[in-house]
Amino acid sequence: MKKISDKQRRIIGFIDRFLTDRGYPPSVRDIQSACNISSTSVVDYNLKILESQGYIQRHADVSRGIRLLTRNTAAGGLVPVPVIGQIAAGEPIPVPAPDTWDVAAVSETMGVPGELTRGREGVYALRVKGMSMVDALINDGDIVLMQHVSAVENGEMAAVWLRAEKEATLKKVYVEPNRVRLQPANSQMQPLYAAPDNVEIQGRVIAVVRQVS
Amino acid sequence: MKKISDKQRRIIGFIDRFLTDRGYPPSVRDIQSACNISSTSVVDYNLKILESQGYIQRHADVSRGIRLLTRNTAAGGLVPVPVIGQIAAGEPIPVPAPDTWDVAAVSETMGVPGELTRGREGVYALRVKGMSMVDALINDGDIVLMQHVSAVENGEMAAVWLRAEKEATLKKVYVEPNRVRLQPANSQMQPLYAAPDNVEIQGRVIAVVRQVS
DNA sequence: TCCCGAAGCGAACACCTGTTCTAGAAATAA
DNA sequence: TTATTTCTAGAACAGGTGTTCGCTTCGGGA
């Protein structure tokens, strides 16, 4: 990116502020009056330069058709993840939306660094309710990042629904002959054994985030 | 938020897709053709309902003056945090640079959502080595977000250096008459008591991030 | 059946807005 | 200085765009 004039810097700054403030881009005349520019053509002139320099992107003949490119890189690492609901020891996980999760149906969204999801699809988050997951080193109020899968490899931490006990829990899953071993993440604790048709994999644990204070 | 019609749900979804796709909101007629709506007035009719229900916000007489409210929670940037080193049960925490942490001296930097740091200053990260923090529900390899403070309020989780034992640990700190109670985060475990001049607060725990797989 | 509210329809209006054009001023180079 | 480029002015055009206004259609209840 090349250097830009002072006026162009002001324009970029204003677009950024306008965008965070109102949620949609400013018009040419918004920029004009805010930056004390005498003519719309001057704004257009500078916007063209900013586009050629890669600071913004414009859609011709579209009102407010400005996209801030510098803004994308700032939020680039952040991936929006829907917080579907909460997981507790007494309820199954509310089934996450199949493919395209509906924006309107989700009550909350959180942003997580892209490193955590690593570009995976079908990632959602659950708020942990209750102390029943302490053996997985997960506390009340923690947020677990999940990936929706129906089967896991041996040793992976997964959300498991135990049909008979009507309990959801987070454990490392090992398939053994005639039984499934559910190993707590805390190595000091004893494993649990269950019949294969009693366990129902509901998702794979990708990460745990705990906000202490 | 009340329930909305199927058509209104489609509109919300389209606005969201359009916004991430192009960086600016769609016009009424964009919505109309994309959602197969016969008239612009119908779009306007439904947009008014969506606004009254709190899904969107509109600016009158402004082209593309639509803001998606459900999207706001995902906003907020990525804050770079230096990973200073690692915390283990046998070593004190390497003292974090006082104010401006030297970029060159830091081996690694991670980005965390701004919600986690909440704009606090002096935040750094430590990689946990060993299993000695399991009673704080922190596992080997976890990353703890710390804030550099020399004193904490009662009940706050902090990194504590025990001078006599030459051990670092993460516990909830309670100052009691003539002693300091160090309470594990795991309520099933017993507290530890130490003499006041034996404990040295090294930082406050803000958050814990565990990447499982 | 009739009634009534919710939802849809199409057209028209009036303003918003990107773009262009001509002309001039200001800065820069030769 | 002159020549050249960059930037600024103001105005006007053409199409985009939000909004409104009658009117119609639909879907239950009474």
Image: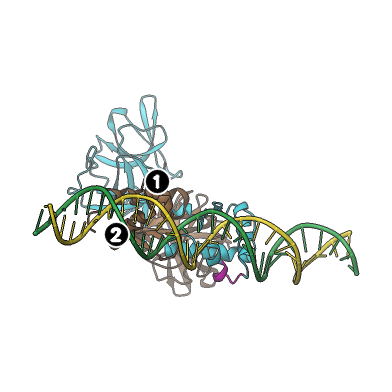
Chain colours: A brown, B cyan, C green, D yellow
- Mark 1 surroundings: few (<14), some (14-19) or many (≥20) residues within 10 A: few
| Comes first in the chain, label 2 or label 1 | 1
- Mark 2 surroundings: few (<14), some (14-19) or many (≥20) residues within 10 A: some
Query: Relative to A120, is B109 above or below?
Result: above
Q: Is residue A55 visible?
A: no
| Residue that numbered label 1 is attached to | A34
Number of on-image labels: 2
Q: Residue B173 location in percent, x, y?
A: 38, 35
Res A155 → quadrant: bottom left
Q: Is residue B160 visible?
A: yes
Q: Are marks 2 and 1 in contact (CB under 8 Å)?
A: no
Quick one: which residue is furthest to the bottom in this view?
A177
Residue B51 part of the magenta-drawn span: no
Res A205 → quadrant: bottom left
Q: Residue B167 location in percent, x, y?
A: 26, 41
Q: Residue D27 location in percent, x, y?
A: 76, 68
CA separation, marks 2 and 1?
Answer: 19 Å
**Mark 1 residue type:** Ala
Given residues A191 and A115, the one toward you in this image is: A115
Q: Quadrant of the N terminus of chain A?
A: bottom left
Identified at 54% across, 69% down, the residue is A198
Please state the extent of the stretch shown in magenta in the rendering: B32-37
Disc on res. B75: none
Q: Residue A145 location in percent, x, y?
A: 44, 59
Q: Quadrant of the C terminus of chain A?
A: top left
Identified at 32% across, 48% down, the residue is A10
Q: Is residue B37 left or right of residue B116?
A: right
**Mark 2 residue type:** Ile
Disc on res. A49: 2
Identified at 62% across, 68% down, the residue is B39
